[in-house]
Image: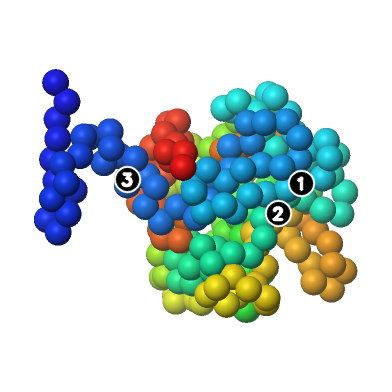
């Protein structure tokens, strides 16, 4: 028999355990790209319509869950979504999570980034192959690479307005107090002046194309405007995904 309970005293609607799990997993969700269909247009299943596009030939059927983004042959541009009001709610906290096939050391490879008023917020594999998160100009990195590139690995970064944490396959691998950093990157209405997130690259406004492209495969990418808890990062790594809207 299903068990029901109240989510919040101000909202007396009874919900099942599975409904509550979906609510928690979708709380603060800005975008969810599953990359399950071929082509170069990828819907955002968060309900916020932050649909992404990529160069032709940027898809593979052999993802961790269904299909995956494959930027192995990309040049100049990775995948991207336009600026929006929902993306612009990322002002003081952020979380990014994805399944990746890790790439070799020797170059920076961007999993996701966004140009903000000062610097970027971004999740990358740095030049040593280690998982790295940047907020503004502050950086925290893991002690070593998340994997050897032979199998899919789940990676995540969370920043709660003070502390940044990195996770590999649900386990915390790095933490640093980097202080309060503004993540604002555009007007609240998503209008002119705000860049959207780049998936698999870092936009360089000087040369007007993407650099540090992730020349490999990524899947099931989620973006939040809040810090995921350790339990939530672990759940994503164990296969839990947001409800599709």
Q: Are marks 1 and 3 in contact (CB under 8 Å)?
A: no
Residue 100 visible: no
Residue 146 disc label: none
Location of mark 1 (residue)? 54
**Left or right position of 212 against 241:** right
C-alpha span from label 1 to label 3: 30 Å
Residue 68 visible: yes
**Left or right position of 78 against 92:** right
Judge the density around disc 1: few (<14), some (14-19), many (≥20) Cα neighbours within 10 Å: many
Relative to 14, does residue 121 appear above or below in the rendering?
A: below
**Corner quadrant of residue 191:** bottom right
Name the residue at 66% across, 42% down.
Answer: 42
Name the residue at 68% across, 24% down.
Answer: 62
At which x and y percent is residue 15?
20, 39
Q: Are marks 2 and 1 in contact (CB under 8 Å)?
A: yes
- Residue in front for this viewpoint, 176 or 39: 39
- Disc on the earlier residue, 2 or 1: 1
**Corner quadrant of residue 176:** bottom left
- Disc on the earlier residue, 1 or 3: 3
Location of mark 2 (residue)? 80
**Most distant residue in the top direction:** 1
SS of the residue at dot 2?
A: strand
- Residue in front for this viewpoint, 180 or 49: 49
SS of the residue at dot 1?
A: loop
At which x and y percent is residue 161?
42, 70
Name the residue at 49% across, 72% down.
Answer: 91
At which x and y percent is residue 117?
62, 78
Quadrant housing the N terminus = top left
Residue 23 disc label: 3
**Left or right position of 29 against 220:** left
- Residue in front for this viewpoint, 221 or 4: 4
């Amino acid at each position: 028999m299903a068990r029901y309970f109240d989510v919040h005293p101000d909202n007396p609607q009874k919900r099942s355990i599975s409904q509550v799990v979906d609510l928690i997993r979708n709380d603060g969700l800005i975008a969810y790209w599953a990359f399950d269909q071929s082509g170069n247009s990828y819907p955002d299943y968060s309900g916020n319509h932050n649909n992404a596009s990529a160069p032709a030939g940027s898809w593979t059927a052999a993802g961790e869950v269904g299909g995956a983004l494959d930027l192995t042959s990309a040049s100049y541009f990775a995948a991207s979504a336009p600026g929006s009001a929902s993306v612009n709610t990322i002002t003081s906290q952020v979380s990014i999570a994805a399944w990746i096939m890790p790439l070799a050391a020797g170059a920076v490879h961007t999993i996701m980034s966004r140009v903000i008023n000062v610097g970027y917020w971004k999740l990358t594999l740095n030049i040593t192959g280690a998982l790295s998160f940047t907020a503004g100009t502050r950086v925290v990195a893991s002690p070593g690479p998340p994997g050897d590139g032979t199998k899919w690995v789940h990676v995540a970064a969370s920043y709660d307005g003070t502390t940044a944490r990195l996770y590999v396959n649900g386990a915390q691998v790095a933490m640093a107090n980097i202080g309060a950093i503004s993540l604002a990157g555009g007007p609240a209405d998503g209008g002119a002046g705000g860049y959207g997130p780049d998936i698999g690259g870092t936009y360089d406004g000087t040369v007007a194309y993407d650099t540090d492209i992730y020349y490999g495969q990524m899947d099931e990418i989620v973006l939040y405007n809040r810090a995921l808890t350790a339990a939530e990062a672990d759940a994503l790594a164990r296969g839990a995904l947001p409800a599709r809207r």
